[in-house]
Amino acid sequence: MLPKDPYILLSVVNTKLRDQYQSLEDLCEDLQADAGAVQEALAAIGYHYDPEGNRFA
């Protein structure tokens, strides 16, 4: 389960992307999370997924 707070979510997701997953899709599939909801939550605080860097920036 991913945190609801967008700033904590950002930290957790970027750490997991760096250390464990090759893509946002892999992370969401494994954690049974909605990739669109994650992207929407982080876009609300000004972060967008960079597939080449495999992180939200």
Image: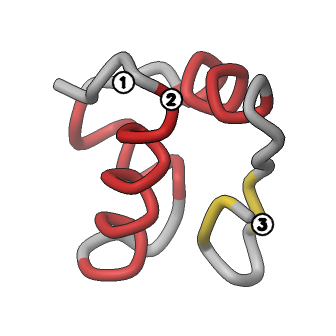
Circle 2 is placed at which residue position? 6
Query: Is the residue under label 1 in contact with that under label 3 (CB below 8 Å)?
Result: no
Circle 3 is placed at which residue position? 50
The three-letter code of the residue at mark 2 reads Pro
The three-letter code of the residue at mark 1 reads Ala
Say which element carries label 3. Answer: strand
User: Where the N terminus falls, by quadrant?
Assistant: top left
Circle 1 is placed at which residue position? 33
Q: In which quarter of the image is residue 18?
A: bottom left
Above/below status of 30 relative to 13: above
Percent x, y of residue 45: 74, 33
Percent x, y of residue 54: 61, 73
Above/below status of 46 relative to 17: above
Q: How crowded is mark 2: few (under 14 residues within 10 Å), some or many (20 or more)?
A: some
| Numbered disc in front, either 1 or 2 | 2
The three-letter code of the residue at mark 3 reads Asp
Say which element carries label 1. Answer: loop
Label 1, label 2: how far apart the Cα atoms are: 14 Å
Residue at 36% from the left image edge and 24% from the top image edge: 33
In this rendering, position of residue 1 left or right of residue 9 = left
| Numbered disc in front, either 3 or 2 | 2
Query: Is the residue under label 2 in contact with that under label 3 (CB below 8 Å)?
Result: no
